[in-house]
Image (cartoon, rainbow, N blue to C red):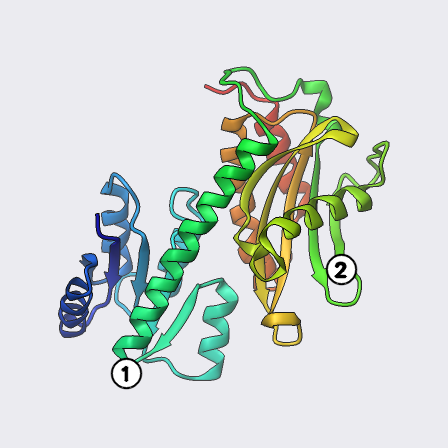
Amino acid sequence: MNPLLLVVDDNTDILYNLKLTLEFNEYEVITAEDGEEALEILSKLGNPPDLIISDIMMPKMNGYDFFKTVSENPLWSNIPFIFLTARTSPRDIRFGKMLGVDDYIIKPFKEEDLLASIAGKITRNKKSRSINEKIEELFTSFEVTTLPSIAEHEKGSVILLHMHWDDKLGPKIASYFPPDLQFSVPIETIGFQLFNGVASIYGHAHIHEAQGLLLAIENIQSQGYIYFDAIEDQAARGGQRPIMLGVIAPRINYFDSLKIRAVLNKIFPKIKQGLEWDIKLYWEEISKILSTPVL
């Protein structure tokens, strides 16, 4: 089956020509003329597309808002996303990359450049999914249950952890909550262990592809759900600075991990844009998820 692409542009001529070009190169293509129409299409698809290409300046819902909505939905957040736009200023390009978009291609573009980007993004995403599945098989097994992951009195053992990569110091804790929680092993050591453990599998350059791993942390008899992303930073090695969000709890069942993923996906855009975010507020939301029975 050919890869499925969703192409969004309010210029019908560009949309038509892109569709012809991509179909000629053995892609299946669905089109939309603005973000609202694209979201409606996504909501009706049985399986998400393999990649999304979107213009930025569109009526009803522009490309920025469309990407934000897609990235905050746990069913769509891992779809590779490319901006294809006439907005050429360095400020526009930086803003697009800061949002976390996978690529930013300027119109007019060379057909071979677009095709290369599409093929590369789809291949990388498939490899990432494959590695994630293998890691989940190696590190944990799930029992389907409707019981909560933890009891109400265990909420005090839940920790929300935010780490980033420092080129001089390595993995470094940015913040965690609650700040007074004590494990038998220092929280810095646990964070270092999680960060470097995943880096050893993916490699530093691709660590941000580790999106949603449920791991057993044997030395503290707990489980951790960790999620990586990266911030565009030209001063950092490779032009990107990896960031990690993690939740550590006595137990995390599979269904709760999906809900936690949705919460973490709300935090990453704030970190990438340098916005303030209340770690206690998100810790409370995650603790409630873990202590509530699965319906």
Q: Residue at x 52, y 48 (%)?
A: 266
Q: Earlier in the sequence, mark 1 or mark 2?
A: 1
Q: Is residue 74 left or right of residue 48?
A: right
Image mark for residue 170:
2
Q: x, y (%) of residue 202? A: 58, 52
Q: Residue at x 42, y 53 (%)?
A: 125
Kind of residue indicated by mark 1:
Pro
Between disc 1 and disc 2, the foreground one is 2
* Quarter location, residue 65: bottom left
Answer whether residue 57 is visible to the viewer in this image: no
106 to 166, vertically: above or below: below
Q: Is residue 131 left or right of residue 116?
A: right
Dot 2: few (<14), some (14–19), or many (≥20) neighbours within 10 Å? few
Q: x, y (%) of residue 238? A: 60, 71
Q: Which residue is disc 1 drawn over?
A: 108
Q: CA distance from mark 1 to mark 2?
A: 40 Å
Q: Residue at x 32, y 56 (%)?
A: 51
Q: Quadrant of the C terminus?
A: top left
285 to 231, vertically: above or below: above
Q: Nearer the viewer, residue 108 or 10?
A: 108
Considering the numbered disc 1 on the image, is that residue within a helix, a strand or a loop?
Answer: loop
Q: Nearer the viewer, residue 66 or 17?
A: 17
Q: Residue at x 26, y 57 (%)?
A: 5
Considering the numbered disc 2 on the image, is that residue within a helix, a strand or a loop?
Answer: strand
Answer whether residue 121 is visible to the viewer in this image: yes
Q: x, y (%) of residue 223? A: 67, 30
* Quarter location, residue 19: bottom left
Q: Is residue 218 left or right of residue 15?
A: right
71 to 62, vertically: above or below: above
Q: x, y (%) of residue 71? A: 43, 52
